């Protein structure tokens, strides 16, 4: 009986090609996993080496500091001994000088008296008289007071040997080695001129009181602090576009002073062009990066626009009010389809905005819904999505309908914005009638 027929050569060739492709794909997957494994090994070895260096340096510094502190304490105690000795020995020295002077005086008087006595009464009557007068002038019964030993200081050193046990306990508990930090960076979100950094706890047993975020350019040597607080999200501004930055975060436990180990650094960048205000507008002063506008004292009116239409639908445009001035109902913060000079506010056609009193305007008309008044520290966000892109004969009366969400102080309004024609990126702008208003855009 014949065995099963062998497959056709074409079928075998196809199967061989598929097997080769599968093997190549498998090889690539293994290569990627091998690379990841090597990176993990490198991270363990490098972090272990860095940890050893940190421990050695820390304990070396600690020994030096403790030695210095002990030397300083010894000097202080020796100075106390010197001070007590000098202050208490001086009266005794003065008393000793007084007694020694009395002894010398008494010796002289004894010698003089013995000479007068040996001479006889008849021959030495004058000497006896002079000696008697001299002796009467000296108070031979007046003796200086000498303190008892119990009344004078007897210095001693009071040293508590228990400090050795206390120090020993603290030293034995000082420092820990953690294999994993309790917090890690979760997400990096690019923004125009900035990056939103979000992090989270990865240790359920760790209770965080504060977080500390640092960043640096990948070409820099040192990280710098950019945020310390209880939030788990922060936007890092002043980010140059298309430049790689590294971010890391650590935490401080509840009731603790020391910070936890740093998270694994994460690299991110922003490809979005930073939002900037137009330069040269008389009524406003700009920051060096042109993302902060301050209404100055110049007597001018009009809208300060962005330097270019850099806001795209689908993004979040954020205005943060740093300082406030006197509010005016004509004030405005918002976006528009195009620049239109000659208007004193964005409360006009082809624009949506919020006034500092919280009123919302769409194409120059005030909405019924209103947001809270803008105050110092307020954040106003605009989120715009395209709903329809119609034609000129649309029954809606416009070529584009955009859905706008304006949020401020935990309140929001949502509405549709009709434009006369389809548009691409949008301008943003602001107008304030009194000085003191400062607005950051990102």
Image (spheres, rainbow, N blue to C red):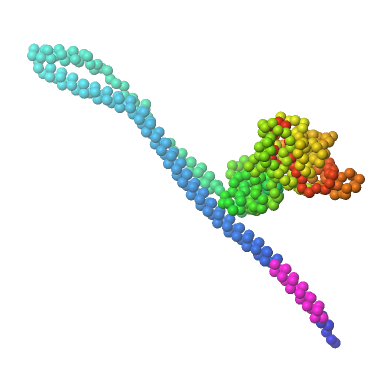
Residue 423 located within the stretch drawn in magenta: no
Q: Say which quadrant the N terminus sits in.
A: bottom right
Q: Residue at x 87, y 49 (%)?
A: 390
Q: Residue furthest front?
A: 342
Judging depth in this view, the residue of 24 and 205 nearest the camera is: 24
Confirm whether residue 186 shows in the render.
Answer: no
Judging depth in this view, the residue of 251 and 152 nearest the camera is: 251
Q: Residue at x 69, y 40 (%)?
A: 440
- Helix, strand or loop for the magenta stretch, by majority: helix
Residue 179 image point, x, y percent: 61, 54
Q: Residue at x 70, y 39 (%)?
A: 320
Q: Residue at x 84, y 41 (%)?
A: 415
Q: Say which quadrant the C terminus sits in.
A: top right
Confirm whether residue 390 shows in the render.
Answer: yes
286, above or below 97, in the image: below
Judging depth in this view, the residue of 161 and 188 nearest the camera is: 188
Residue 15 image point, x, y percent: 78, 75
54, above or below 147, in the image: below
Judging depth in this view, the residue of 200 and 431 nearest the camera is: 431
Residue 22 located within the stretch drawn in magenta: yes
Residue 363 image point, x, y percent: 82, 39
Locate residue 168 relative to residue 103 in the image: left or right.
Answer: right
95, above or below 46, in the image: above
Which image quadrant is residue 70 in? top left
Q: Which residues are magenta?
A: 8-28
Locate residue 439 relative to residue 359 in the image: left or right.
Answer: left
Q: Residue furthest right?
A: 395
Locate residue 351 relative to residue 129 in the image: left or right.
Answer: right
Residue 267 image point, x, y percent: 65, 53
């Amino acid at each position: 009986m014949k065995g099963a027929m062998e497959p056709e050569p074409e079928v075998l060739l196809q199967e061989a090609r598929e097997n080769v492709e599968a093997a190549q794909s498998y090889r690539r997957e293994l290569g990627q996993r091998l690379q990841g494994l090597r990176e993990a090994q490198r991270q363990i070895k490098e972090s272990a080496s860095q940890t050893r260096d940190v421990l050695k340096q820390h304990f070396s510094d600690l020994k030096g500091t403790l030695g210095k502190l002990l030397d300083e304490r010894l000097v202080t105690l020796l100075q106390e001994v010197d001070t007590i000795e000098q202050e208490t020995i001086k009266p005794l020295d003065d008393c000793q000088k007084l007694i020694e002077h009395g002894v010398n005086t008494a010796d002289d008087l004894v010698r003089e008296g013995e000479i007068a006595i040996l001479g006889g009464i008849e021959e030495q009557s004058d000497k006896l008289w002079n000696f008697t007068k001299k002796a009467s002038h000296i108070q031979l019964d007046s003796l200086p007071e000498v303190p008892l030993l119990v009344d004078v200081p007897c210095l001693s050193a009071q040293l508590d040997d228990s400090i050795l046990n206390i120090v020993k306990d603290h030293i034995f508990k000082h420092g820990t080695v953690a294999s994993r930090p309790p917090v890690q960076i979760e997400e990096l979100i690019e923004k125009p001129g900035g990056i939103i950094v979000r992090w989270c706890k990865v240790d359920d047993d760790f209770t965080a009181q504060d977080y500390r975020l640092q960043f640096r350019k990948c070409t820099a040597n040192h990280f710098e602090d950019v945020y310390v607080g209880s939030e788990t999200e922060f936007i890092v501004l002043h980010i140059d576009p298309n430049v790689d930055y590294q971010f890391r975060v650590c935490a401080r436990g509840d009731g603790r002073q020391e910070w936890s180990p740093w998270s694994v650094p994460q690299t991110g960048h922003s490809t979005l062009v930073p939002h900037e205000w137009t330069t040269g507008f008389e009524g406003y002063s700009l920051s060096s990066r042109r993302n902060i506008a301050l209404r100055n004292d110049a007597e001018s009116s009009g809208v300060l626009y962005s330097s270019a239409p850099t806001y795209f639908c689908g993004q979040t445009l954020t205005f943060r009010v740093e300082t406030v001035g006197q509010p005016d109902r004509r004030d405005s913060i918002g976006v528009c389809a195009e620049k239109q000079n000659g208007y004193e506010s964005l409360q006009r056609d082809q624009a949506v905005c919020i006034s500092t009193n919280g009123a919302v305007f769409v194409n120059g008309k005030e909405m019924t819904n209103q947001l809270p008044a803008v105050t110092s520290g307020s954040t106003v966000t605009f989120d715009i999505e395209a709903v329809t892109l119609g034609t000129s004969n649309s029954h809606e009366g416009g070529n584009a309908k955009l859905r706008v969400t304006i949020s401020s102080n935990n309140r929001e309004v949502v509405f549709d914005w009709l434009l006369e024609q389809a548009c691409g990126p949008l301008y943003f702008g602001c107008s304030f009638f009194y000085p003191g208003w400062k607005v950051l855009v990102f």
